[in-house]
Image (tube, rainbow, N blue to C red):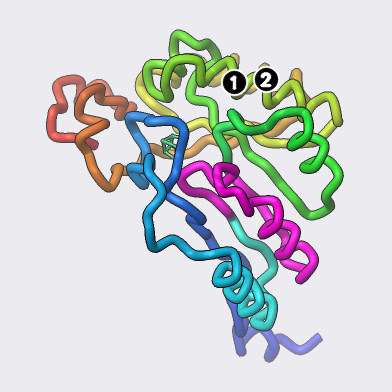
């Protein structure tokens, strides 16, 4: 094969990141997008499908879908199925709270659908101060449901000063489910107010940080 084809580059991105909504049922202190409430100008179902059509025509390989909590959109499954039928692979990130038995069965029944569930500690004592009370248990329930279907999800952990001593435990947890473990670096939230209440930057030098992350 001629290398000329590589020199020309690609006509479209291999993947796109799509923050599909700002609505979220959690209020994590380190939330990159400061999510919470749905914005009034978010895309309608028809508009979102037109966007997917454009990506399909460009031959985008796959999309990374996040938010907010993407599953909080009522048309979430409809849009993901639409992308899949247009031959666009889907990866989405969720806190897992909305993965009930029905959602787990839907996820497991789809090809080219990847899921990562956020968990920021191997115990609720480490996770919940960052992601909110009960968030650890809900994420673990989602993992149990997907594991019942033998679905190979990923656990996504944002490394903080509180959870880095638990990385081995988090890896062991992922192995128990036959899952992968993805580590994400902490990035500054859009609005640092949440983070400044409880600094989670993973360096001891910032122990007195009050200016947000
Ligand atoms: S679950 Fe995700 S989008 Fe929601 S507040 Fe937490 S980090 Fe932000």
Helix or strand or loop: what does disc 1 sit on?
Answer: helix
The disc label shown at residue 1, or none: none
- Give coordinates of residue 41: x percent, y percent: 39, 63
Q: Is residue 175 above or below residue 152?
A: above
Front residue of 76 and 66: 76
Residue designated by label 1: 138
Query: How many neighbours does mark 2 have within 10 angstroms: few (below 14), some (14-19), or many (20 or more)?
Result: some
- Give coordinates of residue 82: x percent, y percent: 73, 64
The segment highlighted magenta reads: 65-93
Residue designated by label 2: 141
Q: Residue at x 53, y 21 (%)?
A: 167
Q: Residue at x 38, y 26 (%)?
A: 160
Front residue of 52 and 183: 52
Mark 2 and mark 1: Cα distance apart in space? 5 Å
Q: Residue at x 59, y 55 (%)?
A: 64
State which quadrant residue 23 falls in.
top left
State which quadrant residue 131 falls in.
top left
Query: How many neighbours does mark 1 have within 10 angstroms: few (below 14), some (14-19), or many (20 or more)?
Result: some
State which quadrant residue 95 falls in.
top right
Q: Residue at x 35, y 22 (%)?
A: 161
């Amino acid at each position: 094969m001629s290398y000329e084809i590589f020199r020309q580059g690609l006509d479209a991105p291999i993947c796109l990141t799509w923050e599909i909504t700002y609505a979220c049922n959690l209020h994590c202190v380190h939330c990159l997008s400061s999510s919470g409430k749905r914005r009034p100008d978010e895309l309608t179902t028809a508009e979102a499908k037109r966007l997917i059509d454009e990506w399909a025509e460009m031959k985008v390989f796959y999309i990374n879908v996040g938010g907010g909590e993407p599953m909080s959109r009522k048309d979430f499954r409809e849009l993901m199925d639409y992308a899949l039928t247009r031959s666009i692979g889907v990866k989405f990130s969720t806190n897992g709270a909305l993965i009930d038995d029905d959602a787990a069965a839907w996820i497991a029944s789809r090809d080219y659908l990847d899921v990562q569930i956020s968990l920021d500690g191997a115990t609720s004592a480490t996770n919940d101060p960052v992601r909110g009370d009960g968030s650890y248990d809900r994420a673990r329930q989602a993992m149990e449901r997907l594991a019942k279907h033998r679905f190979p999800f990923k656990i996504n952990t944002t490394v903080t000063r509180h959870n880095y001593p638990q990385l081995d435990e988090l890896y062991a947890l992922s192995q128990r489910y036959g899952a992968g473990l993805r580590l994400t670096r902490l990035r500054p939230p859009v609005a640092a107010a949440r983070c400044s209440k409880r600094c989670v930057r993973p360096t001891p030098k910032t122990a007195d940080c009050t200016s947000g992350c």
